[in-house]
Amino acid sequence: MKLAKTLAVGVAFAVALMAGAASAKDVKIGLVVKSLGNGFFEAANKGAQEAAKELGGVEVIYTGPTSTTAEGQIEVINSLIAQGVDAIAISANDPDAVVPALKKAKQRGIKVISWDSGVNKDGRILQLNPSSNELIGKMCLTLAKDHLDGGKGDFAILSATTTSTNQNIWIDQMKKQLKDFPGLNLVTTVYGDDLSDKSYREAEGLLKSNPNVKVIVAPTTVGVLAASKVVEDKGLVGKVYVTGLGLPSEMAGAIKSGATKEFAIWNPIDLGYSATQIAYHLVKGDATGKPGSEIEAGRMGKIKIDDKGEAAMSDPFVYNASNIDQFSKVF
């Protein structure tokens, strides 16, 4: 009787261990964002969790610093290494500063990709751009032109941090393509560090020191929302317009108030989804991420890597009064 009871306990313990092993996630992916509490990245996390559920056996650890610093992201990366994740997908605050930590992750066998805001080649396998950098630059200039009478006048740029990879590339593209928009005059570029209060102050300050500026272009969701609030608070609706890259859920009020006529963005849900799909297939070994190769990305289809080790997801989409109500309920 005692032997039977001992065997029963042993069997139960073994079953419990097996159940625990079965419920454990096969693949752990650290989704590192520029900062927590940012609506763009929260939407990207929704897509990442969707991909994890679809793939099965995947745990996405959504994490990032509380402020947009490279130091904060380095701490997060080291923590993920200690947790033994299989992959890290990062939207970087600095393309260089995080590389040593990411190299350490790679040495431990962790698959590293960057998405949205990239890191230098030494720190990752590939970079997933939300769109073509040239198209984003052109779109921002087109939006500025469309907000000006006759497509002519002064505009300013309100960006994220001075080291933000993607914003700097897009601003560079805007400057390169200004020759194709002869009516536009770029007056200044200021930086709000992707913080709402600082972005608000920078937008307020540039309008005070540059009264001829009629359009603020913000290639960042935090900046475009903060600048729109300044225009509303200062009674400048109809005199100064804000445009750039923003989330429909956050920009619906600005469209309705008239602070902006239209803005653009890709779908951050799709971006998080694609980054997770790519990281998963790299971990599983059915994709290499090498230039010229393709990676399956679920409902997004195949994503091709170019000769620079980068991939583009989709073209920017324009939101205005005709479609804002539809999309503001989604992200």
Image (cartoon, rainbow, N blue to C red):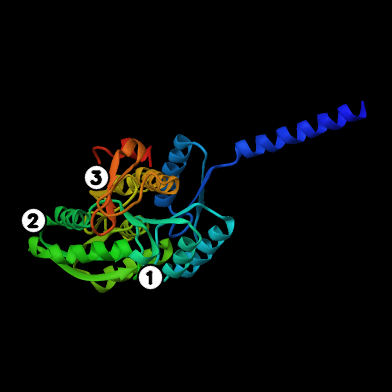
Residue 193 drawn at (x, y percent): 39, 66
The residues tagged by marks 1 and 3 sit, at their Cα atoms, a distance apart of 30 Å
| Marks 3 and 2, the one that precedes in the sequence | 2
Left or right for 52, reference 154? right
Left or right for 1, reference 63? right
56 to 33, vertically: above or below: above
Location of mark 3 (residue): 317
Left or right for 66, reference 168? right
Location of mark 2 (residue): 150
Amino acid under disc 3? Phe
Residue 54's quadrant in the figure? Answer: top left
- Viewport quadrant of the N terminus: top right
Location of mark 1 (residue): 96
Label 1 secondary element:
loop
Tell me if label 3 and label 2 are in contact, CB under 8 Å: no
Residue 61 drawn at (x, y percent): 52, 50
Residue 138 drawn at (x, y percent): 17, 56
| Marks 1 and 2, the one that precedes in the sequence | 1
Q: Residues within 10 Å of mark 2 (few under 14, many from 20)?
A: few
Marks counted in the figure total 3
Q: Nearer the viewer, residue 251 or 26?
A: 26
Amino acid under disc 1? Asp
Mark 1 or 2: in front is: 1
Label 2 secondary element:
helix
Q: Which residue is at 32% across, 61% downward?
A: 234
